[in-house]
Amino acid sequence: MRRHKLTLVLAVVLAVLTFTAAVAPVYASTLNQKQQKKQKIEQDIKQQQGNLKQQRSRKSELESEMNQLDHRLQELQSELARINREIAATERKIARVEAELAEAEAALAEKETLFKRRLRNIYERGYVSYLDVLLGASSFSDFLTRFNNLKIIADNDQRLVDEVRAERDRVEAMKEELEQEKSRLDGMRRQILNNEAELERTVASRNQVKEELQEEITRSEEAIRKMKLKEEKLEKEIQALIRRSASNRGAGGGGGGGGAVVRGSGRFCWPCQGGRITSGYGNRVHPKTGIYPDFHRGIDISPADTIFAADSGKVIWAQWKGSYGNCIIIDHGNGFTTLYAHLSAIYVGLGQSVSRGQHIGIAGSTGGTSTGVHLHFEVRVNGEPTNPMSYL
Ligand SMILES: [Zn+2]
């Protein structure tokens, strides 16, 4: 009976061991795969966000260029309106001058006709009178007096004709000047219309580029949205895997259930592979803002790559944490917690138990640090930051 019972127990233990041995690596590799996949998606999102930023800045550059083009177009249009007004005014002046010219020409024609008639009369009469004088005039001086009077009238007429002709020439010159002015304005108008057409072509081509950019932006936004959904889904799967593993281990351990208390030794090992302290605990000049004092809650270690749990404990934070970037916090169950910040990869999940020296992540520069890849390491006693150097 006893033997039988022992065999049964052994069989159960063996079965559990076999199960654990078979499941644990599968679990680890699945979790690893999912975490790597999530990391890859995070990188893709970051890259796509970079693209989006460039696309948006190109679009805003284009928009300011288009604003300038629009402004220039408006200037051209108001210049065109001004030229059109000048052309209209010049055309009105030309019409007035043409009327004046017609008047002047009519006056000239009238004066010339009058003058010619009078001239004919004078010569006809003058000739007759001359003959009179020659053939039987009372006296030669009598003839001369008559002839001179007629000559004075003729000279007067000639002066009048000359004056009218000068007036006509002046009006004609004015007309010519106005026509030259009008053709100059017409030339300007053609030039403006050409410029305007060219500008409109440029605006149209810029508009097309802008539309294409907007399509690119929409595509980028859509891609980021999809990747974020995928990332969220993966994160849920990862957390589920971790919870399952924690409860499996709790059951396998045979005591304490899922919330097994993990207690650290109180002595911490160096939290990463190699490196030295590049920024100590306490007041310092902030590496990014240059402000002093900036209270540094931990120590910075660089160069850093592989991150180790400084002591055994339970993971109480394993995700993004504001300016800490990707961050892990381990509760060592004895009042101590340790914090590992700016990580590029997290290999543990919330609620997971870790042992001292366990590989928990990879150092990085997430969370907007300006000092490059390093590990920011904090030791907290009952939640209060303390100098890690007292425990390392
Ligand atoms: Zn730091």
Image (cartoon, grey):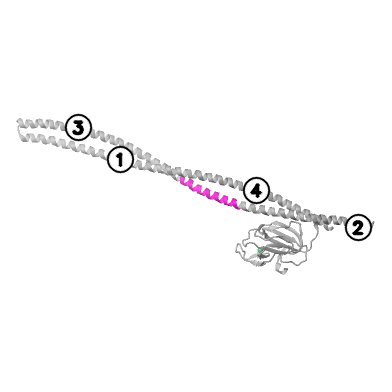
SS under mark 3: helix
Q: Which region of the structure is painted magenta?
A: 50-73
Seen from the viewer's position, the closer of residues 147 and 50 is 50
Label 1 crowd bin: few (<14), some (14–19), many (20+), radius 10 Å: some
Residue under numbered circle 3: 114
Measuring from the top left, give residue 273's x and y in whole percent: 69, 65
Check mark 2 vs ligand 1: CB closer than 8 Å? yes or no.
no
Seen from the viewer's position, the closer of residues 320 and 123 is 320
| Numbered circle sitting on residue 195 | none
Q: Is residue 17 left or right of residue 270?
A: right
* Distance (Cα) linking label 1 and label 4: 73 Å
Examine the rendering and report whether any part of residue 177 can be seen.
yes
List the single residue furthest toward the right: 1
SS under mark 4: helix
Q: Is residue 145 left or right of residue 113?
A: left
Measuring from the top left, give residue 143's x and y in whole percent: 8, 34
Query: The disc labelled 2 sits on which kind of residue?
Result: Leu
Give whichever of discs 3 and 4 has the lower sequence position. Answer: 3
* Distance (Cα) linking label 1 and label 3: 29 Å
